[in-house]
Amino acid sequence: MGQNTVHLKSLTTTQVAQFREHGYLSPVSVLSAREAREARVQVEAIEAQHGGKWPRHLSLKSHLVYTFLDRIVHHPALLDAVEDVLGPDILCWSSRWFIKDKNDGGFVSWHQDVPYWGIDVGENIVTAWVAISPATRANGCMKVIPRSHRSLVPHKEGVSNNLLLRGQEVAVAVDESRAVYMELEAGQMSLHHGLMFHGSEESHVDERRIGFAIRYIPTRVKPVDGLPRDSVQLARGVDRYGHFGLETRPQRDLDPVDVEQHRLATATYAEINRLAVAKHLEMIAQSARAQG
Ligand code: NI
């Protein structure tokens, strides 16, 4: 990997080693207190226009239609840290809101992300989970199992009351006593690998937990064969591969052209997700046969 010759932009060599070895890194300070506060004001203003809840149809990829979220996805402090783990050519594959209120039943079962994304599970893929409000153990911050990112495991689906699209959960035993809780102040982020076991618990306190999860991949990452062509946004560097369609960045909020691009991108992803799950299950069946 030529690790000794890499010039890091933001993280220390110890932090990069922590991410590689253990599959996560937390906390990393990225937004100023003022930036985080301003983002929260905008989030809550949008919620107020939609009956007090972040609109469902904007759960995924809302950075394609709101400029304040586009600025977070492309924030230099954030991308410097991501570059230190992914290299200089970076795509934003997606973004997603994880918002929890007191006793709203929201929790996330233990799962791995990449099997559901229709991209190469063997790749170095990272989620930057940006705290727009404080994330604490009490309000259900993310928890991870260190070193669980080294292999893909089977998942089952349909776990109820789950913030995940398919209610997926790893179909293996998880030792909760090994869990690390990634508490964050507003403006900090955690990074976790695409195969990391992660989840979170319900909130029982008044402090809202507003998290914006951004998925970054190196430009070389290949989509799984036989799926519809996915779209991504260039976050930094150059895309020399062209594996994905490239999304444009919004110049103003809710521009009709951007709204249409967002609609198409999220519809395509819904289809990819459905097909990727089927392929994932097939792969597991095959490897079980090969091993059996
Ligand atoms: Ni996840």
Image (cartoon, grey):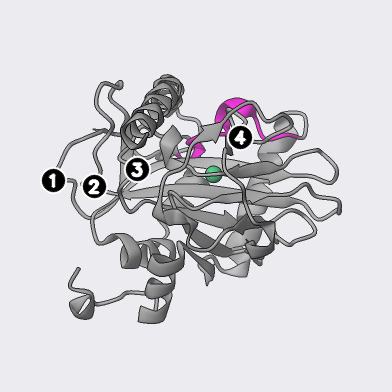
Residue 185 part of the magenta-drawn span: no
Residue labelled with disc 2:
219
Checking the image for residue 240, the label placed there is 1
Does residue 109 appear left or right of residue 254 in this picture?
right
Residue 57 x %, y %: 58, 25
Residue 147 x %, y %: 47, 62
Three-letter code, disc 1: Arg
Residue labelled with disc 3:
121
Quarter of the rendered structure image containing ligand 1: top right
Residue 161, image quadrant: top right
Which sits earlier in the primary sequence, circle 2 or circle 3?
3
Of the residues tagged 2 and 3, which is closer to the observer?
A: 3
Residues at marks 4 and 3 touching, judged by CB atoms closer than 8 Å: no
Q: CA distance from mark 3 to mark 1?
A: 20 Å
> Is residue 132 in view?
no
Residues at marks 1 and 2 touching, judged by CB atoms closer than 8 Å: yes
Whether 22 is drawn above or below 71: the answer is below
Which quadrant would the N terminus be assigned to in this image? bottom left
Residue labelled with disc 4:
164
Give SS at disc 4: loop
Residues at marks 2 and 3 touching, judged by CB atoms closer than 8 Å: no
Q: CA distance from mark 1 to mark 2?
A: 7 Å
Give SS at disc 3: loop
